[in-house]
Image (cartoon, helix red, strand yellow):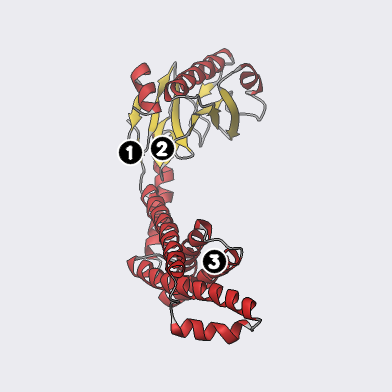
């Protein structure tokens, strides 16, 4: 059972499993609890005001000083984010979340804060919405305005055409960053996951940056470029090693090594295979992040 499921069972508040967001209303205050850092830390969110004024930087200094479970707070106009201390176990972290919620709401009531729309500061009209995957405390009118603006942005994004030629140039430039990382780390005597990840990330990021849009065609092109450049980088690393050993110039060795291909040495294949593996992992994680970001852009709805 997850931390937020523990809190849900103990409190009866609602849990949106798609976004791992716990939310509800406590003593008149809408709130949400969201995970951060791969579900390892948690934040407690409110939208608050007092006499139509947003929260000041030092409004909750006393609350934080007296709390054992609130690590920090961040005011963002009307929205306030409280970072909650994690416990050694899931159960303890769940207890800390409940305690933080109780302490904050008690403090808000004692200081006459109001539950407000985070766009306008108007009280008594807000509800909890996801807009592009982000928790917002809005009135129906503010939500309609925000989604209308978002739809315009989405339409503009959809109208962008993919510039394949520019994308290829971007992928090649990005892959050179990966080549440099592989060669530099290789000359230090290591085959590092870092160099492979840099190759994968920089190649796909370069394509998207200059190509303006990433499609399945762009992903396929970037994979081909990455695989080729990993081979070139490995040959360049090997050429540098041979050139230094025999006192030769790099370009006396590199063309021959590149043309002849693999050296008959098991270590060569191990190193090349590891770099390919790490590059694919970096590439895959970046593509996943891009796809997830696009999905979140369309995750716009009322919670509950």
Q: Which residue does the image show at 33% across and 20% down from the upper left?
A: 9
| Front: mark 2 or 1 | 1
Badge 2 density bin: few <14, some 14–19, many ≥20, Cα 10 Å: few
Q: CA distance from mark 2 to mark 1?
A: 25 Å
Q: Position of residue 146 (x, y in %)?
A: 43, 44
Q: Nearer the viewer, residue 241 or 276?
A: 241
Q: Is residue 262 above or below residue 9?
A: below
Q: According to the image, label 2 marks what residue?
A: 141
Of the 4 image quadrants, the one containing the C terminus is top left
Q: Is residue 39 above or below residue 292?
A: above
| Front: mark 1 or 3 | 3
Badges 3 and 2: C-beta atoms under 8 Å apart?
Answer: no
Q: Which residue does the image show at 37% across and 29% down from the upper left?
A: 2
Q: Which residue does the image show at 39% across and 68% down from the upper left?
A: 223
Quarter occupied by residue 152:
bottom left
Q: According to the image, label 3 marks what residue?
A: 182
Q: Where residue 217 is drawn, which disc sits there?
A: none
Asked whether residue 294 appears in the rendered view, the answer is: yes
| Secondary structure type for disc 1 | loop
Badges 1 and 3: C-beta atoms under 8 Å apart?
Answer: no
Badges 2 and 1: C-beta atoms under 8 Å apart?
Answer: no
Give whichever of discs 2 and 1 has the lower sequence position: 1
Q: Position of residue 60 (x, y in %)?
A: 62, 23
| Secondary structure type for disc 2 | helix
Give whichever of discs 3 and 2 has the lower sequence position: 2
Q: Is residue 63 left or right of residue 44?
A: right
Of the 4 image quadrants, the one containing the N terminus is top left
Q: Which residue does the image show at 35% across and 69% down from the upper left?
A: 220
Q: Position of residue 128 (x, y in %)?
A: 40, 32
Q: According to the image, label 1 marks what residue?
A: 18
Badge 1 density bin: few <14, some 14–19, many ≥20, Cα 10 Å: few
| Front: mark 3 or 2 | 3
């Amino acid at each position: 059972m997850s931390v937020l499921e523990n809190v849900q069972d103990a409190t009866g508040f609602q849990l949106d499993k798609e976004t791992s967001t716990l939310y509800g209303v406590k003593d008149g205050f809408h709130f949400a609890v969201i995970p951060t850092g791969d579900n390892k830390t948690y934040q407690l969110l409110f939208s608050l005001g007092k006499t139509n004024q947003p929260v000041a930087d030092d409004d909750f200094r006393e609350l934080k000083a007296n709390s054992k479970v609130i690590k920090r707070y961040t005011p963002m106009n009307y929205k306030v984010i409280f970072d909650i201390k994690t416990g050694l176990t899931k159960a303890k972290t769940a207890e800390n979340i409940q305690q933080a919620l109780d302490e904050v709401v008690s403090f808000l009531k004692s200081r006459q804060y109001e539950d407000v729309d985070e766009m306008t500061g108007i009280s008594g009209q807000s509800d909890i919405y996801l807009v592009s995957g982000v928790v917002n405390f809005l009135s129906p009118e503010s939500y309609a305005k925000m989604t209308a603006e978002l739809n315009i942005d989405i339409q503009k994004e959809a109208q962008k055409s993919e510039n394949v030629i520019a994308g290829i140039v971007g992928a090649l430039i990005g892959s050179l960053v990966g080549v440099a990382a592989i060669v530099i780390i290789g000359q230090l005597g290591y085959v590092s996951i870092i160099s492979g990840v840099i190759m994968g990330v920089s190649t796909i990021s370069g394509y998207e940056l200059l190509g303006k849009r990433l499609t399945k065609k762009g992903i396929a092109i970037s994979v081909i470029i990455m695989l080729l450049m990993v081979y070139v980088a490995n040959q360049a690393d090997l050429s540098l090693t041979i050139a230094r050993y025999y006192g030769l110039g790099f370009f006396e060795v590199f063309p021959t090594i590149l043309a002849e291909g693999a050296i008959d040495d098991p270590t060569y294949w191990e190193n090349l295979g590891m770099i390919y593996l790490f590059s694919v992992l970096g590439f895959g994680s970046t593509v996943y992040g891009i796809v997830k970001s696009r999905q979140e852009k369309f995750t716009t709805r009322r919670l509950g």
